[in-house]
Amino acid sequence: LSIMSLRRPPTTIELKPDDIEEYDEILRQRQVDVNDSGFSSPHNNSGYRGVHSKLSPTKRKQKVAERIGVAK
C-alpha cells in the first residue's frame, strides 16, 4: 500500500521596493523616537542592560515575577 501525501506549492514572499522604503522609514522613526525620549534602544547593545538593571537583586526578582504573572 503506497500512500502519497499531497503537497502544496511553496509559499513565496515578494519584497518590493515600496516595502523596503516603508521599513527604512519605520526604522528612522524609531531612532528619532529613541533619541527624543533619551532611552537606549534594545537593538543598540552599547550599555543596554534592561529596565531592571538598577534594581537590587531582590527587587528585580519581584518585578520579574510580577511581569510574568507569578508574583505572590
Image: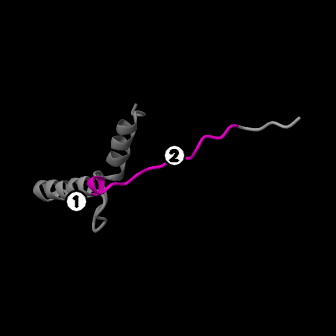
Which quadrant holds the C terminus?
top left
Looking at the picture, does residue 44 appear above or below residue 51? below
Quarter residue 45 falls in: bottom left
Q: In the image, 65: left or right of 2? A: left
Q: Which residue is mark 2?
A: 11
Q: Position of residue 44 (x, y in %)?
A: 28, 64
Inspect the image, locate mark 1, and give the three-letter code of the amino acid beneath it. Answer: Ser
Give coordinates of residue 6: x percent, y percent: 68, 37
> Is 7 one of the magenta-colored residues?
yes
Identify the magenta region.
6-20
Residue 63: horizontal and vertical position, in percent? 33, 42
Q: Earlier in the sequence, mark 2 or mark 1?
A: 2
Query: What residue is drawn where x is 43% and y is 34%?
Result: 70
Q: Please report contact status of discs 2 and 1: CB closer than 8 Å, yes or no.
A: no
* Label 1 sits on residue: 40
Q: Position of residue 16 (x, y in %)?
A: 33, 54
Which of 52/35 is in front? 35
Q: In this image, 9 relative to 32: left or right?
A: right
Q: Is residue 5 highlighted in magenta?
A: no
Q: Secondary structure at mark 2?
A: loop
Q: Which mark is residue 55?
A: none
- Marks 2 and 1, how far apart at CA: 37 Å
Residue at point 40% right, 37% down? 68
Query: Which amino acid, mark 2?
Result: Thr
* Residue drawn where x is 44% and y is 50% of the image: 13
Q: Regarding mark 1 in the picture, which secondary structure is present there?
A: loop
State whether residue 8 is above or below residue 30: above
Q: Nearer the viewer, residue 69 or 46?
A: 46
